[in-house]
C-alpha cells in the first residue's frame, strides 16, 4: 500500500536535492578556485569545509527540532523580529541570487567555449534559464522527484568517468601531501566553508520534508556524498594535470571528459558526458530558482512565490551578461564575496540559537 503525503518530500528526494546543490560544483570553476589556494593538497579543503559547516548545522538542527514546523525564514522572523529579520533574509536572498547569476554564466561559458562555439552566449543563457524556470514552476515535489530520478544516472556517470581516467592518473602529483602547509589548508577550509553552505540555506524547505529525522539524515548523507565526490574529483584533476597546469585550466571536468576514451571504438566521449551534465545542471538551477523565489516571496509577503520566477529569470539574465571577462570576475570579485559570506553562514545558526536561549525559548 502506498502512503500519501500531502505536499511533502522524503529522505530520498531531499538527499538528492542536497547532492545536486553541493556535489555538482565539481563540474564548474569551484575546483580551480580551490586549487589556487591549496595547490596539490586542495582536495582536503572540501572535507575540512564540510566538517566546519557541520558545527553550524548542529545548532540549526536544535532550532528546527525546537520549533518543529517552522522553516529558517520563520525562525529568523520569530527570534529577531520583522525589521532585523527582513535584512537577514535579504542577505540570504542576495546570496542565492548571486550564485544563480554566477553559475548560469559559468555553465553558459562552458557550453560556449567548449561545445557550441558558434552559438551566441545570450542564447545559451536563455536556454539554461528557461529550462530551470520550467522545472522551478513545478514546485519542490517535482524538483525532488527529478533530482532523485536523475541522481543514480549522475552517480554512474561520475564513477564511469573516474574509471575511464584511471590510467592517466599520476598519484605522485599529490606529494607532498601537505601542499602549501596544513595551516593554510585548515584556514582555507574554514574560510571557504560557504562552498557547502547549502545545508544551511535549504532549511527554508524544512516544513516540506516529512519528518525531522528524514531531513537530518538527508542533509548529512547529501553533504557526506557530495564532499567525497568533490574531493575524489579534485584528486583526479590534480593527478591528471598536476596542480601547476590545473590552475591554468578553467573547466577541468569538461577537459577530462575530452581526454578519456573507451578503446578504439569510442574516442570522443565528451558528448555522452555533456548530455547527462546538462540534465543535472537544469535540475540544479531549478532548485536554486525555487529557493530564490521562496526567499523573495517571504520578503515581499507574496503567498505564491512562483509568481516571482519570471522576474528572477530576467534579473539573472541581465546580470549574467554584465561581466565581459567572466573568468577574471570568478577568481577575483567572487573570491572576495565567498570569503565574506562564510562568516555570516557559519554564525547564523549559532546566533539564532543564542537568541532563543536568551529569550528562554528552550525552557517552555
Image (tube, rainbow, N blue to C red):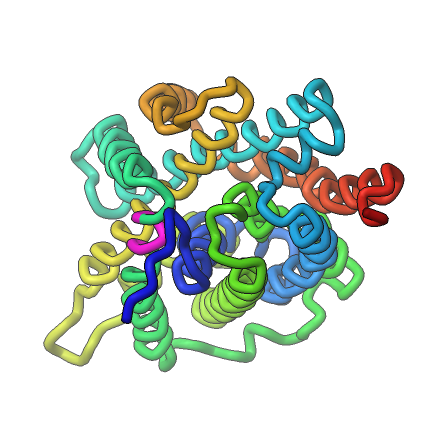
Residue 133, position in %: x, y?
30, 34
Q: Is residue 234 at all visible to an observer of this figure? A: no
Side of 125 where 190 appears, left or right: right
Q: Residue furthest left?
A: 265
Residue 134, position in %: x, y?
25, 36
Q: Is residue 130 at all visible to an observer of this figure? A: yes
Query: Is residue 300 a member of the stretch shown in magenta?
Result: no
Q: Examine the image and state in which quarter residue 240 appears.
A: bottom left
Q: Main secondary structure of the magenta part?
A: helix
Q: Nearer the viewer, residue 195 or 273?
A: 195
**Count of marks placed on residues:** 0
Residue 289, position in %: x, y?
40, 35
> Residue at coordinates 72% horizontally, 54% vertically from top-left?
62
> Residue at coordinates 68% horizontally, 34% vertically from top-left?
76
Q: Examine the image and state in which quarter residue 116 appears.
A: top left
Residue 56, position in %: x, y?
72, 52
Q: Examine the image and state in which quarter residue 255 appears.
A: bottom left
Q: Nearer the viewer, residue 318 or 254?
A: 318
> Residue at coordinates 76% horizontally, 64% vertically from top-left?
181
Q: Nearer the viewer, residue 6 or 158?
A: 6
> In the picture, which quadrant includes the N terminus?
bottom left
Q: Is 129 rendered above or below residue 308?
A: below
Side of 171 where 68 appears, left or right: right
> Residue at coordinates 38% horizontally, 79% vertically from top-left?
166
- What is the magenta range? 142-146
Side of 33 where 106 appears, left or right: left
Q: Is 258 rendered above or below residue 162?
A: above
Amino acid at each position: 500500500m502506498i502512503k500519501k503525503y500531502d505536499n511533502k518530500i522524503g529522505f530520498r528526494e531531499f538527499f538528492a536535492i542536497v547532492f545536486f546543490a553541493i556535489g555538482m560544483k565539481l563540474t564548474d570553476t569551484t575546483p580551480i578556485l580551490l586549487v589556487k589556494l591549496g595547490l596539490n593538497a586542495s582536495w582536503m579543503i572540501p572535507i575540512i569545509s564540510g566538517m566546519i559547516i557541520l558545527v553550524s548545522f548542529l545548532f540549526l538542527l536544535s532550532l528546527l527540532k525546537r520549533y518543529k514546523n517552522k522553516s529558517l525564514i520563520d525562525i529568523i522572523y520569530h527570534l529577531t523580529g520583522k525589521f532585523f529579520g527582513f535584512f537577514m533574509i535579504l542577505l540570504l536572498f542576495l546570496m542565492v541570487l548571486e550564485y544563480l547569476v554566477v553559475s548560469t554564466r559559468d555553465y553558459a561559458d562552458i557550453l560556449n567555449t567548449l561545445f557550441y562555439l558558434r552559438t551566441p552566449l545570450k542564447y545559451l543563457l536563455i536556454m539554461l534559464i528557461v529550462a530551470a524556470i520550467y522545472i522551478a514552476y513545478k514546485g519542490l515535489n517535482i524538483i525532488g522527484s527529478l533530482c532523485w530520478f536523475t541522481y543514480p544516472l549522475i552517480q554512474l556517470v561520475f564513477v564511469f568517468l573516474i574509471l575511464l581516467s584511471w590510467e592517466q592518473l599520476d598519484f605522485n602529483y599529490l606529494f607532498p601531501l601537505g601542499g602549501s602547509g596544513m595551516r593554510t589548508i585548515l584556514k582555507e577550509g574554514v574560510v571557504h566553508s560557504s562552498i557547502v553552505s547549502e545545508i544551511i540555506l535549504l532549511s527554508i524547505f524544512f516544513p516540506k520534508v516529512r519528518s525531522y529525522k528524514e531531513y537530518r539524515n538527508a542533509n548529512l548523507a547529501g553533504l557526506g556524498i557530495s564532499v567525497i565526490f568533490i574531493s575524489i574529483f579534485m584528486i583526479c584533476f590534480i593527478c591528471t594535470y598536476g596542480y601547476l597546469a590545473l590552475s591554468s585550466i578553467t573547466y577541468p571536468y569538461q577537459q577530462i571528459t575530452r581526454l578519456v576514451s573507451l578503446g578504439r571504438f569510442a574516442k570522443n566521449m565528451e558528448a555522452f558526458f555533456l548530455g547527462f551534465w546538462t540534465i543535472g545542471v537544469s535540475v540544479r538551477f531549478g532548485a536554486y530558482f525555487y529557493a530564490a523565489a521562496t526567499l523573495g516571496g517571504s520578503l515581499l509577503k507574496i503567498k505564491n512565490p512562483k509568481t516571482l520566477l519570471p522576474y528572477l529569470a530576467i534579473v539573472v539574465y541581465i546580470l549574467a551578461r554584465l561581466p565581459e571577462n567572466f573568468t577574471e570576475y570568478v577568481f577575483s570579485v567572487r573570491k572576495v564575496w565567498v570569503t565574506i559570506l562564510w562568516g555570516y553562514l557559519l554564525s547564523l545558526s549559532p546566533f539564532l540559537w543564542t537568541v532563543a536561549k536568551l529569550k528562554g525559548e528552550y525552557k517552555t
